[in-house]
Image (cartoon, rainbow, N blue to C red):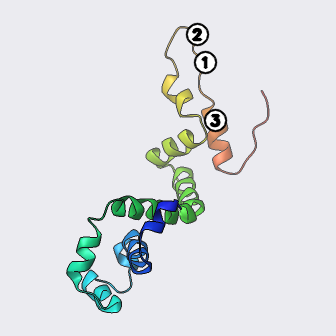
């Protein structure tokens, strides 16, 4: 994380980490309860949110948390794409840098068809023999 986190107290850093979690994962569940843990007024926590750089620090921390979930997210996209979900297929194609091939297919005279067969076979764990 960025060195500008040095501008916050340990309690503020804990509050940043708490805010960066999805609400369902926060313990304690409410800001009021967290204020009790920190032994400060709830209004103090509200004021901290207005500190310069505070919200940016929350957002950066949340993005760091997401990085830990990327393998699971990619697996879910792949699973749904293999089941035939068109939005998930489009995401898988885009992540494989094949979205432009699909988007541009037939865009001009002599345009080649995209390698859709190859994508589908690979999504199902197969290999494609050269034609």
Quick check: 13 above or below 118? below
Question: Which element type, helix, strand or loop, lies under badge 3?
Answer: helix
Which residue matches tag 1?
Answer: 112
Question: Which residue corresponds to mark 2?
Answer: 110
Q: Label 1's element?
A: loop
In the image, residue 11 lies at what x, y percent? 40, 81
Q: Residue at x 53, y 60 (%)?
A: 73
> Which of the 4 image quarters holds residue 114?
top right
Query: Residues at badges 2 and 1 in contact (C-beta under 8 Å)?
Result: yes
* Distance (Cα) linking label 2 and label 3: 19 Å
Counting from the top left corner in percent of width and height, residue 115 is at: 63, 30
Say left or right for 34 vs 66: left
- Residue sitting at 50 percent across and 66 percent down? 65
Assess disc 3: are there few (<14), some (14-19) or many (≥20) residues with their C-alpha within 10 Å of its C-alpha.
Answer: few
Q: Foreground mark, 2 or 3?
A: 2
The answer to whether 108 is drawn above or below residue 5 in the figure is above
Q: Earlier in the sequence, mark 2 or mark 3?
A: 2
Secondary element at image label 2: loop
Q: How far across and down, in percent of the image, does residue 102 sit?
A: 53, 29
**Which mark's residue is nearer the viewer, 3 or 1?**
1
Image position of 88 with respect to 67: above or below: above
- Whichever of labels 3 and 1 marks the residue nearer the N terminus, that label is 1
Q: Are marks 2 and 3 in contact (CB under 8 Å)?
A: no
Sort mark 1 into few (<14), some (14-19) or many (20+) by Cα contacts within 10 Å. Answer: few
Instruction: Please give the name of the residue rendered at 26% of the width and 65% of the height, measured from the top-left corner.
Output: 50
**Quick one: which residue is furthest to the front in this view?**
7
Q: Quadrant of residue 19?
A: bottom left
Rounded to the nearest whole Å, what is the CA distance between mark 3 and mark 1?
13 Å
Residue reaching furthest right? Answer: 130
Residue 44 rendering spot, x and y as whole percentages: 24, 79
Task: Decide if residue 86 is on the left or right side of residue 112.
Answer: left
Q: Which mark is residue 117?
A: 3
């Amino acid at each position: 994380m960025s060195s500008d986190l040095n501008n916050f107290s340990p309690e503020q850093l804990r509050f940043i980490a708490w805010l960066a979690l999805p609400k369902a994962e926060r313990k304690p569940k409410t800001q009021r309860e967290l204020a009790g843990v920190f032994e400060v007024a709830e209004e103090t926590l509200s004021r901290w949110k207005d500190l310069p750089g505070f919200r940016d620090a929350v957002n950066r921390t949340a993005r760091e948390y997401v990085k830990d979930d990327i393998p699971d997210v990619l697996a879910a996209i792949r699973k749904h794409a293999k089941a035939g979900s068109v939005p998930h297929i489009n995401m898988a194609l885009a992540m494989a840098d094949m979205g432009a091939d699909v988007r541009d297919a037939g865009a001009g005279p002599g345009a080649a068809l995209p390698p859709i067969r190859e994508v589908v076979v690979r999504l199902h764990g197969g290999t494609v023999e050269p034609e």
